[in-house]
Image (cartoon, rainbow, N blue to C red):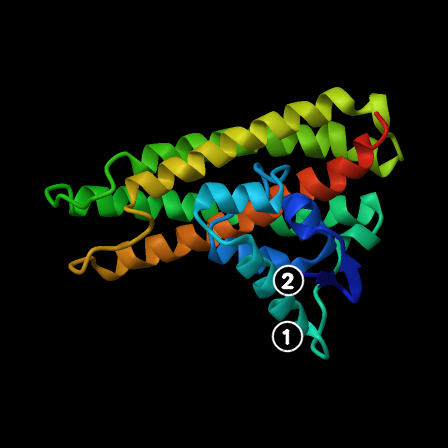
Amino acid sequence: MVSRVHGGPLMQPFQTSLGDLAAANPAATRVFMRHRLDFCCGGRQPLGVACERAGLDPAEIAAEIELETQRDTGQAQEVRWEDRSQGELADHIERHYHEGVRRDLPSLIEAARKVERVHAQKPAVPAGLADTLVALLAEMQSHMQKEERMLFPLLRRGFRGEQVYMPVRMMESEHDTHGEQLVKIRELTDDLRAPAHACSTWRALYHGLASFENDLMQHIHLENNVLFARATRGA
């Protein structure tokens, strides 16, 4: 099977990494999200390997990506950040994703505390969720400050290769930690499935966490697989 990305043939898609597929074709990220394929922290995995580990047929996933790409044809195209400058991408990450974390995560923490308090005696209550989110917010606040004050200014000025290799690797390592926190959140919330008796706050909390997870995965993908990959190329 030959898959295509924006009109060009993608040779041997099963050997292409999830990160490269996502960077070349934004439609691929929607497919990966649906099937819980980690294209951000686990973005270096080839499609075939990732599908095998998840019990999926890589041919079916490639076909689904092709279908999503065709659906985009003739519609407003998503921005291909691979074609934008390092400065434009860094600005977008700060404005959209960093501001989003600072805006949304505190309200999710508050909702988690309320659900844990009000429904403390119910077996499905996500005990420990609020503390997990508090820890994640603290980690991300520190992480984002490092990027905004140190790494992103270097990237905007054109630093690359060995000049930024170590700070990039540090940020990627911290991304792995964020990914581990997302897994823990899924474990605490029964895979973000609210029980039948859940109140509106409980349901809204899980919906908000799903949206936050989606944004964080896109956020990490753009940094690991586009912004950082270009900066360290040839390092």
Residue 39 vs residue 231, the one in the foreground: 39
Marks 1/2 in contact by CB < 8 Å: the verdict is yes
Label 1 – label 2 distance at C-alpha: 9 Å
* 123 relative to 157, above or below: below
Residue 162 vs residue 43, the one in the foreground: 43
Q: Residue at x 82, y 31 (%)?
A: 154
**10 Å crowding of disc 1: few (<14), some (14-19), many (20+):** few
Q: Residue at x 48, y 30 (%)?
A: 138
Q: Which residue is labeled 1 in the image?
A: 71
Query: Image quadrant of residue 195?
Result: bottom left
Horizontal side of 184 relative to 42 (left or right) equals left
User: Residue 80: percent from the left, percent from the top?
Assistant: 75, 58
Q: Is residue 101 in view? A: no
User: Residue 54: percent from the left, percent from the top?
Assistant: 45, 45
Secondary structure of residue under mark 2: helix
Farthest residue to the left: give it.
Answer: 121
Give the quarter of the figure containing the C terminus: top right
**10 Å crowding of disc 2: few (<14), some (14-19), many (20+):** many
Secondary structure of residue under mark 1: helix
User: Residue 123: percent from the left, percent from the top?
Assistant: 13, 43
Upstream in sequence: badge 1 or badge 2: 2
Q: Which residue is labeled 2 in the image?
A: 27
Give the quarter of the figure containing the N terminus: bottom right
Residue 24 vs residue 193, the one in the foreground: 24
